[in-house]
Amino acid sequence: MKRLGTVLHLSPHGHLIIRLEETSLPRMNAKVVTKKMDRVGTVYDIFGPEKAPYVSVKLDKKMPKASVQALVNERVFVA
């Protein structure tokens, strides 16, 4: 399990926006999980400046909306 970054907010398209903490970029479609290994979704897009990129995560369809709001300001990981 590798640290991905901190969740900033939920986009209007329903994706989580995460600021990367690691220098290496995750691979596309990598599984994103919480520290308790609950599945959040998959890496959908990587964007932003080269030195401080962001990641868009497409949420898992089974993820409840209440859980999504609870993820804001939490760290997530790549499994």
Image: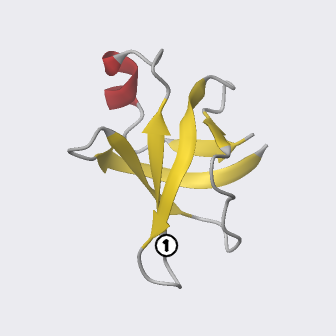
Badge 1 marks a residue whose secondary structure is loop
Q: Quadrant of residue 34?
A: top right
**Residue pushed farthest left?**
12
Above or below 64: residue 46: below
Above or below 35: residue 47: below
Horizontal arrangement in the rendering, residue 28 relative to residue 53 (left or right): right
Question: Closer to the camera, 70 or 65?
Answer: 65
Q: Quadrant of the C terminus?
A: top right
Which residue in the structure is indicated by mark 1?
Answer: 53
Give the crowd class for mark 1: few <14, some 14-19, many >=20 residues within 10 Å. some
Horizontal arrangement in the rendering, residue 52 relative to residue 4 (left or right): left
Residue 61 coordinates in the image, percent (x, y): 45, 20
Question: Closer to the camera, 74 or 77?
Answer: 77
Q: Residue at x 44, y 83 (%)?
A: 49
Horizontal arrangement in the rendering, residue 47 relative to residue 29 (left or right): left
Q: Residue at x 30, y 38 (%)?
A: 14
Q: Amino acid at mark 1?
A: Pro
Residue 19 coordinates in the image, percent (x, y): 46, 61
Above or below 36: residue 29: below
Q: Residue at x 54, y 63 (%)?
A: 20
